[in-house]
Image (spheres, rainbow, N blue to C red):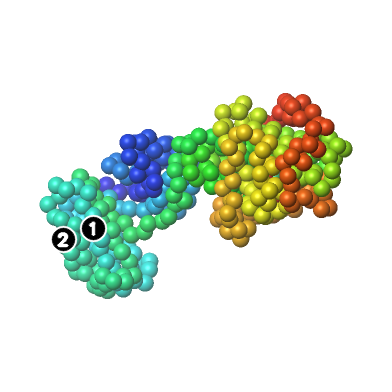
Amino acid sequence: MNEKNIFIVRAGEAALKGENKPYFERMLVERIKKLLKRFDGVEVTRKEGLIFVHADKSIPPEDIIKWVSKAFGVQTISPAVEVESDIEAIGRAAVEYMNGIIAERDIKTFKVKAKRADKQFPVESPDIARQVGAMILKGCKVLKVDVHDPDCYLYVNVRKGISYIYQDKIEGFGGLPLGTNGKGLVLLSGGIDSPVAAFMMAKRGMAIETIHFHSYPYTSERAREKVEDLASQLAVYCSRFKMHIVNLLPIQEEIVRHCPEEETTIHVRMFMMRIAEKIAEKNGCTMLVTGESLGQVASQTAEALVVTNSAVSMPVMRPLIALDKTEIIAIAQEIETFETSIEPYEDCCTVFLPKHPLTKPKTERILKSESTLDIDDLVEKAVDSEEIVDIFPKK
Ligand code: ATP
Ligand code: MG
């Protein structure tokens, strides 16, 4: 029965979605299948509220766990053993399983937790735990039961026909399956914050596209490669996506020529929003996403955010708004974007950076300064000049 490695995958919130539950679970299965496509000999199935992965023994189990846990919507994963749903057979398999654990780890105590999903099974859950526990005590002489603080829990999940034995529940990211919550356009810089913002929205099921602004030749080819590198790390979680690339330099030069120096950054931010909104509309994205965090820099004060927002009518999601930099960095490290983000390449925001940026801009004053610019024309030209790059998940 056991020529394959078996993994039980539990959906998090997707499992709570009432009538939409089959849809969310189907999307999750599709996503897991896609992530496991890199291996031959893997089967993903859904049965009675759980997802099962059967994988050839030649594939290291840690590789399966690594990739399954990258699917948003996965709460936990357990490598498991399959056994016929018969109390004697379960007991024998449990003894063999525990002997395997003893050989690898120094454990002295255990506790069996049993769940009877098949209500027709003749033994009730507490009795399953008791009987299997007794068989383990007989078959693994070094072990004792500790119901309060055991070195190891052994889970027994009795289902119709086939039951499962496992010990670990490895945590995934949780969230909702990718693509179950619309599509957003993420303003992706080369910094630490915006990849984390993209990750957080995608974790709630939002499919993403990204837009990156550069100021070539003030910003280098290498700076752009860095952003593509970051994007491909994001694609590990967010699947393949489009990156729109726009040179902002002509607009920045207009701003510098016509607007007061201390306002430069806020004007640049507003143009980024306007261009992003147009490109979002053209590509079926209904929201913009940024990595802004309240008060982090001059352009992210409460006043500055109000002004920036006034440039667009599309909703702007700012998932990092209430996070501290240390909290953002912790996520960036977890999702492995941090090391690339801190590579020291120039960003278009640092070109023409004012010495004393306004921290409390007023919309009225900013719009007045902009009235000397042909905003629609500048935005249209920028949109028309976009380049599109297909971003694939990093290997
Ligand atoms: P990050 O770490 O994301 O670069 P930051 O602290 O440097 O953030 P800003 O430069 O003020 O902040 O940018 C705020 C947000 O504006 C970014 O999180 C990102 O969403 C967007 N943004 C900034 N620069 C760019 C860019 N060159 N291309 C696309 N989006 C950008
Ligand atoms: Mg930045």
Mark 2 lies on residue: 127
| Disc 1 residue crowd, few under 14, some 14–19, many 20+, Cα 10 Å | many
Residue 2, image x and y in percent?
A: 30, 49
The foreground one among 257 and 183 is 257
Looking at the image, residue 289 sits to the left or right of residue 359; the answer is: left
The residue sitting at 37% across, 57% down in the picture is: 169
At label 2, the amino acid type is Asp
Residue 167, image x and y in percent?
A: 33, 59
Residue 286, image x and y in percent?
A: 56, 32
Dividing the image into 4 quarters, which one contains the C terminus? top right
The residue sitting at 28% across, 71% down in the picture is: 148
- Structural distance between the alpha carbons of marks 2 and 1: 9 Å
The residue sitting at 74% across, 52% down in the picture is: 359
Element at label 1: strand
Mark 1 lies on residue: 114
* Residue furthest front in the image: 364
At label 1, the amino acid type is Ala
The residue sitting at 38% across, 68% down in the picture is: 105
Is residue 37 visible in the rendered structure shown here? no
- Marks counted in the figure total 2
Rendered image quadrant of residue 285: top right
**Mark 2: is the Cβ under 8 angstroms from ligand 1?**
no
Rendered image quadrant of residue 267: top right
* Marked residue nearer the N-terminal end (2 or 1): 1
Rendered image quadrant of residue 274: top right
Looking at the image, residue 158 sits to the left or right of residue 101; the answer is: left
